[in-house]
Amino acid sequence: MNAKPIDLRELSKEEVTALVAELGDKPYRAAQVWEWLWKTHAPSIEGMSNISKDLRAKLAERAVLRPLVIAEQQKSNDGTIKCAFRTWDGHIVEGVMIPTEKRITACVSSQIGCSLDCDFCATGKLKRVRNLSAGEIVDQVVQIARLAEEHLKRPLTNIVYMGMGEPLLNYANTMRSAERINAEDGLGMSYRRITVSTAGIAKQIRQLGDDGAKFNLALSLHAATDEKRSSLMPINDSNNIEDLVSALRYYTRLTRKDVTFEYILFRDFNDSLEDARDLLRICSKVDAKVNLIEYNATDDGRFQRTPMEQALKFQNYLESKGITARIRRSRGRDIDAACGQLANKNEPAVAGGERVMKPVQKD
Ligand code: SAH
């Protein structure tokens, strides 16, 4: 009996080469298989059309390929497209294509569900099911890039790990997927175009420094005192602001990169000029710029969005003190595709239910 099948995209290049050799084929075949896995994205082992039938059959006996498939797409009236992807074991994760005039950004998930339970985030209400593999993270990018070409005839320009899940709690696969997105024999996209967003896991932020991570790092700060931050994000109890500042200083020193603080403005909670002063104090300790994010209502109604006038005051205060601060408008809200809204709303409660397919109209 065969043991658990090998997932081909869990293998390193050396391991693929060894496997192909073991099956009696030449090294150049292994290079071709590797390309199918990470560059041309074969839908199946059978679909690796320039590989001999014999090798494909032998590979299929020993190994599997487990690509994500698009189960459903929804298009926002601002052009944002949300994709529900089905995993090989029947779960749904969401990824989003966000077009602007200059950019097309893919927002990808790193886990099925999330373990962090941030108060303001719909994904936090789901249970964490499992980590996504590096292959499954890359698949979202590949499929969203195809949508960009298909609908807008433009290439993807940016990738943000800001979908479901906490990328730094899926550290190895986050690193590997970013490496595969960057690699010449992968998607060939510059690390400067990749941003990983974290709720703040101090130990892993230091690890990024030790590993010389080359992508951009964003930290979901959202409040500038521990009291407020802990009331929003339980993770702050074990990774408080001081721990994070210290880890970020370590990271910026080793990588020579600055970081982005994400700060959702909640009306009458963290949007006063006193809050801005507290935030400034943190910014004075870390090389950072600030993205002020519009709050997207989730279902429970604890928070409201800060009025734009107040958001501008908050921004102006930071800018007057020499901190780069930008207000990020929300996209895709009408289809629950915006930050914090990814929660498989259309997912049938019982596994095996039929999903309604909503094909997206071409532009
Ligand atoms: N776990 C990671 C990545 C996922 S969240 C992280 O926490 O950074 C991506 C961004 O969306 C984070 O900054 C998150 O705080 C923000 N977000 C979550 N819920 C939101 C909401 N309801 N409105 C606006 N932004 C939200």
Image: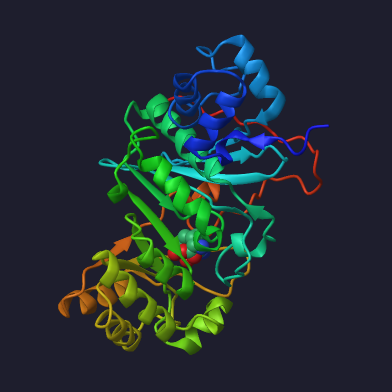
Task: Choose between 3 and 267: the one closer to the eye.
Answer: 3
**Residue sitting nearer the eye, 82 or 170:** 170
Q: If the image is split into quadrants, where does the N terminus sit?
A: top right
Of residues 227 and 28, the one nearer the viewer is 28
State whether residue 289 appears in this view. no
Judge from the rendering whether residue 125 lies leftward or rightward of residue 148; answer left or right. Answer: right
Q: Residue at x 46, y 32 (%)?
A: 38
The part of the image, by quadrant, that contains residue 118 is: bottom right
Render colour scheme: rainbow
Does residue 325 appear to the left or right of 243 in the view shown?
Answer: left
Tell how many labels.
0
Residue 52 visible, this angle: yes
Q: Nearer the viewer, residue 121 or 361?
A: 121
The relative height of residue 240 versus residue 306 in the rendered view (above or below) is below
- Residue 346 location (% of width, % of height): 68, 45
> Which quadrant is home to the C terminus?
top left
In the displayed structure, 353 sits above or below 197; it is above
Q: Position of residue 181 (x, y in %)?
A: 40, 41
Where does residue 51 sit, x and y in percent of width and height? 53, 14
Residue depicted at 78% across the width and 49% down the height: 349
The residue at the point 61 percent across, 23 percent down is 44
Tell me where residue 345 appears, x and y as whole percent. 66, 50
